[in-house]
Amino acid sequence: MLKRMTISNLTVFPQASLEFGDNLNVIVGENGAGKTHLLKMVYSVLAVSAEEGRKPNAPLPTKSALQTRYADKLINVFRPESLGRLARRKQGRERCDISLMFESADWDTSFSFATNSKSEVSIDKLPKAWMDVPATYLPTRELLTIFPNFVSVYEGHYLEFEEIWRDTCLLLGAPMQKGPKEKRVRELLAPLEAAMGGAIELDKNGRFYLRSADGRVEMPLVAEGLRKLGMLSRLISTGALLDKGYLFWDEPEANLNPRLIKSVAKSILDLSGAGIQVFIATHSLFLLREIEILLANKANKNIKARFFGLHRKDDGIEIQQGDSPDDLGDIAALDEELAQSDRFLAEDI
């Protein structure tokens, strides 16, 4: 499990140290507070290690290899004009420093890059081994409708899409999980398929369908909120999200009604309890409260969660953190939802 990340001069963050929970991590903040930047930074580092670790007979990490791989991944995931654009430009501050510490010290790594860097990082701590668990990123946009031929086109041409889309499409197209883990897959899929009213199916023509008792419906005709549930269910069925690894989910609540948000919250807790270390970024009070309700359930008493509140200050974003949503501090996006409820109740409607 990832235990800690320290950052200095990353985009909107002057300095921060994040202590992560073993199972669930919830990052809350208004638009522009840097939630996605945190997810992308952690994902990029983990994805590099996981990609290299999957290669047969992969050599041990070297500084020269990581200098290139970290830089390439960050540029392809964030899509800045140059790597140095990810570093805060403040007088006297010329570098961005990133450090990640894991339960297994062999994976610990730290690196830095300058504000004028084009595509090069400096490795300050070299990991001793590659990771042997996958990292998965679910963006705010669903990908089932663009899946046909997307990877081949992406790798054959330059497209101004984040590499996260390509990474996730590769996982969506993986074979279905077979063998002794099928029972666990069915348990995790059951609430999602009930919410969707069917199961996700990948046809030999390369297109995804929602299959129900009434037949098959091609993905472009399925509601976008259900497609997001479909992505999650497909990644569970292929084993990408089963009993180990990392899930990064940017705004799980986007395009979902409250009933479906409840299904998503339950799946997030189920995955966290199954051994996946989950990181989500949100500004939804409804999702936050649903997660809090589920964590209070005795069935989830062993899930270790952490909450991070992002707050604007004069010199950038400050992070408050703790084991409870009460430790988030005053989040403008959440306060506005509560204030609207108060205004509605105050009116004679």
Image (cartoon, grey):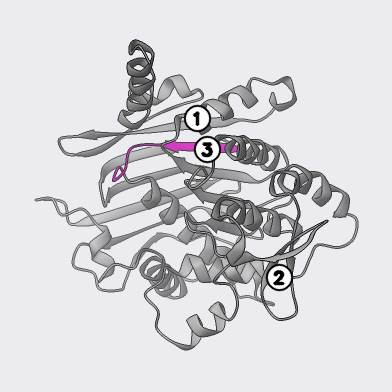
What is the three-letter code of the residue carrying label 3?
Answer: Asn
Kindly indicate the quadrant of the structure image that contains residue 31.
top left
Quarter containing the C terminus: top left
- Left or right, 86 with respect to 167, comes to left
Q: Position of residue 176 (x, y in %)?
A: 79, 65
Quadrant location, the N terminus: top right
Quadrant in which residue 15 is drawn: top left
Which residue is denoted by mark 3 in the rendering?
Answer: 25
- Between marks 2 and 1 in the image, the one whose residue lies nearer the viewer: 1
| Residue underneath mark 1 | 286
Report which residue position mark 2 lands on: 174
> Which residue is depicted at the point 37% across and 26% down?
337
Give the vertical position of 293 relative to 104 (above or below): above
Q: Nearer the viewer, mark 3 or mark 2?
A: 2
Name the residue at 40% across, 73% down.
Answer: 72
Tell me which corner region of the image, top left, top right, bottom left or bottom right, holds residue 277. Answer: top right
Could you tell me residue 128's position as x and y percent?
56, 61
Examine the structure image and report whether residue 308 is included in the region drawn in magenta: no
